Image (cartoon, rainbow, N blue to C red):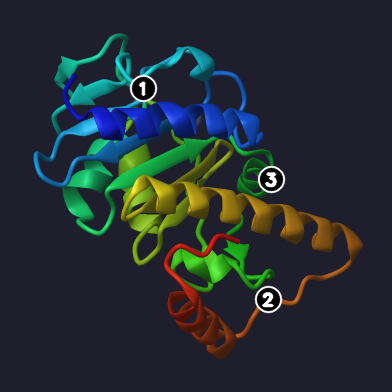
Amino acid sequence: MMLEELRKQVSHYGKQMLADGLTRGTGGYISVRDPETGLICSTPSAVPYPEIEPETVLVTDLEGNIIEGTGKISSEWYVMSQVYKNRPDINALVHAHAKFCTVISALRIDLPAACFSLPIAGGPNVRCTAFHSFYSQDLADDIFDKMKDRKAVLMGNHGLLAGGNDLDEAYSVASTVEFCAEVFWMAKCAGEPVPLTDEEVEIQMADTKRYSSKARF
Ligand SMILES: [Zn+2]
């Protein structure tokens, strides 16, 4: 089996995403790029995560041609392809219909750094796109634009997309942004959240790097 280690990771994090309540049913996807070959390993479309084993994880090229694995490629393939082709810093993507990110995305607002850990996504906020249908190039273009200088983006009325240098980091960013969305929502229900200043965001970004690249919040 080709790219066995990466396919094990994709299978593992699919199950983890469900166990952590980060997504529902067959919603979302997990994908990772092999830095050597440039091939992409991703969860097949509409297959329950508990049923996705390493051998069923799809291996495709950047044009979406299936090389190994079983099932259909994700309906949001355009998004994966556009990000991988244009963001050398991103080698893994986690897309989740995460509840609190979807709540904020339904308000069509950018998620501010109301919690200290949000700057691990790369800046003072996580931006939100307009709504676009799954298969559209418009979705891919809008995501690419709003994800500039960031490792995450809210997809309008839809959910969350998070990226990282590897799958461990992408999953950590996804889980942290969802936690921050929950904190923001709860703070908003209780009063008016106070976001970090630009200077505080800079300090947090520097501190997070210094603390450990493996730190998880
Ligand atoms: Zn989706």
Q: What residue is at 61 percent from the left and 39 percent from the top?
A: 98
Residue position for label 3: 100
> For the residue labelled by badge 1, is the local secondary structure a helix, a strand or a loop?
loop
Residue projecting furthest to the left = 37
Crowdedness of circle 2 by 10 Å Cα count: few (<14), some, many (20+)? Answer: some
Q: What residue is at 16 percent from the left and 47 percent from the top?
A: 35
Q: Position of residue 93 (x, y in %)?
A: 37, 43
Q: What residue is at 28 percent from the left and 34 percent from the top?
A: 6
Residue position for label 1: 75
Compared with residue 140, is residue 122 higher up or lower down, i.e. above or below? below
Ligand 1 near label 1 (Cβ, under 8 Å)?
A: yes
Q: Position of residue 127 (x, y in %)?
A: 50, 59
Query: Pointers 2 and 3 in contact (CB under 8 A)?
Result: no
The mark found on residue 195 in the picture is: 2
> For the residue labelled by badge 3, is the local secondary structure a helix, a strand or a loop?
helix
Query: Pointers 3 and 1 in contact (CB under 8 A)?
Result: no
Quarter of the picture containing the N terminus is top left
Mark 3 / mark 1, whichever is N-terminal: 1
Q: Position of residue 143 (x, y in %)?
A: 38, 48
> Amino acid under label 3?
Phe
